[in-house]
Amino acid sequence: MSRKQARDFHPEALKLFDQYVHGQLSRRGFLQQAGRYTAAGIGAEALLQALSPNFAEAQQVPPDDKRLWTAYVEYPSPDGYGKLRGYLVKPVNAKGKLPTVLVAHENRGLNPHIEDIVRRVALDNFIAFAPDALFPLGGYPGDEDKAREAFTKLDQTKTRADFIAAAKQLKVLPDGNGKLGAVGFCYGGGVANYLATQLPDLAAAVPFYGAQPPLDTVAAIKAPLLLQYAEQDERINAGWPAYETALKAAKVNYQAYIYPGVQHGFNNDTTPRYDAAAAKLAWERTIAFFEQHLRG
């Protein structure tokens, strides 16, 4: 089965895949239930394979791109797991100090897709860094199923502290301009929302289809927000009306977009849930938002 065929497959099968990705359904459960929606000659295993990420096919910026300096660096996190590692990328020919952007990954850790996102951010003339929350458990294991399983074993209190520690490290980078933004996807979108409640000096946050923070923390948000949602994302969108009410009550500077006809994960070009038009527009808005709030 081609990725195009998978993208056009029965919407209920795609909802099952979303449940599988987010740990609400086991692999066996997906295969058993997806069989109800497969066409003649197409098995559930073939559907799962077509829906799963293809990192090589989707890569936009190669790891050895000569325009970029890249490194895996470790940093202390005394209130979290003690020590974390992440992927740091800077443009080679940067002039002057640059804004910094923390990239928060999905619930599989620092996989090749997120590394590609970090490089894309850096090519737009930012210093970009993505922590790997799975580092205390050995790092991203090179397999999405294993990564997803490992992610459930993290102590989320420590992991949230690790992201805060990463943000603070970025804020004081010698070649940074002192302004920090955060962007995150899925689980990482929730992290971006969370960081906005915890860091009064965060200059901008862009959560992509991320879980909303506790409503009683919204009043602490000082950063301007650009919130990106998918119309066909019932699980995340269920929390949006109350979040919007709280943002308005707290007079938070925010913009929110709900992209019509797309699913959770529409920016992730490694899977058939990717929507090129919505992803392009959302990315353009993201970079413009960072340009507005992180430069100067």
Image (cartoon, helix red, strand yellow):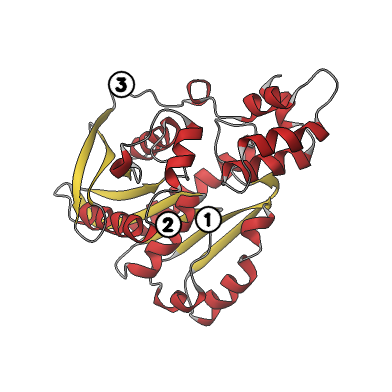
Residue 139 drawn at (x, y percent):
33, 37
What amino acid type should be assigned to the residue bearing mark 2? Val
Residue 64 image label:
3
**Element at label 3:** loop
What amino acid type should be assigned to the residue bearing mark 1? Gly
Q: Is residue 220 above or below residue 146?
A: below
Residue named by callout 2: 191
Q: Contact (CB < 8 A) between labels 1 and 3?
A: no
Q: Residue at x 42, y 57 (%)?
A: 192
Of the numbered discs 1 and 3, the one sitting upstream in the chain is 3
Q: Residue at x 42, y 63 (%)?
A: 194
Q: Nearer the viewer, mark 3 or mark 2?
A: 2
Residue 70 drawn at (x, y percent):
25, 31
Judged left or right of residue 243, residue 216 is left
Residue 228 seen:
yes
Q: Is residue 233 above or below residue 129?
A: below
Judged left or right of residue 43, residue 103 is left
Of the numbered discs 3 and 2, the one sitting upstream in the chain is 3
Residue named by callout 1: 210
Q: Contact (CB < 8 A) between labels 3 and 2?
A: no
Along the line of sight, the residue nearer the viewer: 198 or 258: 198
Along the line of sight, the residue nearer the viewer: 138 or 280: 138
**From this viewpoint, which residue is outermost toward the bottom?**
249
